[in-house]
Amino acid sequence: MSRQTVKVPGASRLRCVHRLQSEYASLHREPLPDLLARPNEENLLECFFILQGPSDSAFSGGVYFGLLQFPSEYPMAPPNISLSTPNGRFQVDTLICMSNTGFHKSEWSPAWSIRSILMGFVSFFLDSTPTTGSVETSVSTKRQLAATSHAFNAANAKFRNFFPEFVNVQRPIVARSMAEAPPSQTNTTLLNEEDTSRHTGQAPSTVSDVDHTTVQLNRRSGTVLPILARLALTMICFAVASRLYSQKAIIWGYAALLVDGANQAAPTT
């Protein structure tokens, strides 16, 4: 087969690759809040992720780089997980014991997915329960490590390769906006300054500006479309009625209709 880096024999290989491809596509469509996950395209068994520390925690302001390493038997066997960024909760580059990892193969279920594993990891990350691979540190230590996490990640070659847009730039993870936005507004909410300036020539100052523009467009389309429908229907009616009424009456009817349509289309404040 064309992909040589994922060496999984026979049907197991196909099942593993198809499952991972499906899950990666799902994460791309619907990212998790405060978290981005991207596959190693040269080896789908490696899923790199970054986690943004929640603002109401000791990890606020920190960005933590980690890895999900899948076995070739996935989804029939569990992955392992580790963090590369010093964080004060887990040891660096050390496998972390969780019930849905390789430490507990007997408890593993194929129903687990990348999404559910990472959701469980975030919850466990914010907990203080000790486990294999965990450390105990003070809140002040966690905050200090969060403040230095950006510089540490920028020196990591893999981080620079998989998340170049976060190198030397402290920005919120875009998954937060996508997770909070209604499905119908996802594309608008996620317009960044570069995309907006490319299409409009001027970048919005905030996401709310983009949402306001969307509301105005929706309001206009919601007004114009019904008017057009009314015009079309009324013109048909006039065409049918022209056999019964005089030409002068038809002209007056059209004039009244146009005045009414202009009043309806007038912008409101």
Image (tube, rainbow, N blue to C red):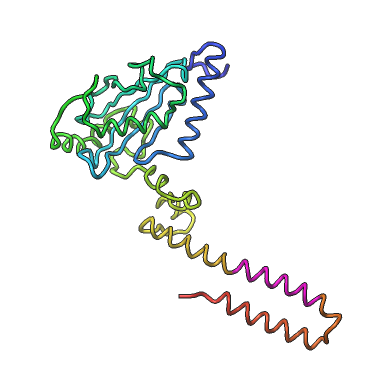
Instruction: Name the residue nearer the viewer: 64 or 5.
Output: 64
Farthest-out residue, top:
9
Farthest-out residue, bottom:
248
Count of labels in the image: 0
Horizontal and vertical percent for residue 118?
Answer: 37, 31
Reply above or below: 168 against 89.
Answer: below
Report whether 53 appears left or right of 250: left
Residue at 43% over, 58% down: 211
Horizontal and vertical percent for residue 21?
Answer: 51, 27
**Quadrant of the snapshot with the N terminus:** top right
Residue at 49% over, 13% down: 7
Report whether 258 appears left or right of 62: right
Residue at 42% over, 39% down: 31
**Quadrant of the snapshot with the C terminus:** bottom left
The secondary structure that most of the magenta stretch takes on is: helix
Reply above or below: 132 against 238.
Answer: above
Please provide the residue range marked out in magenta. Answer: 224-239
Instruction: Name the residue nearer the viewer: 147 or 142.
Output: 142
> Does the magenta segment cover residue 53?
no
Residue at 40% over, 19% down: 108
Report whether 162 appears left or right of 228: left
Horizontal and vertical percent for residue 192?
Answer: 41, 50
Farthest-out residue, front:
107
Horizontal and vertical percent for residue 197?
Answer: 44, 55
Instruction: Name the residue nearer the viewer: 32 or 38.
Output: 32
Reply above or below: 217 against 1.
Answer: below
Reply above or below: 189 against 259.
Answer: above
> Does the magenta segment cover residue 227?
yes
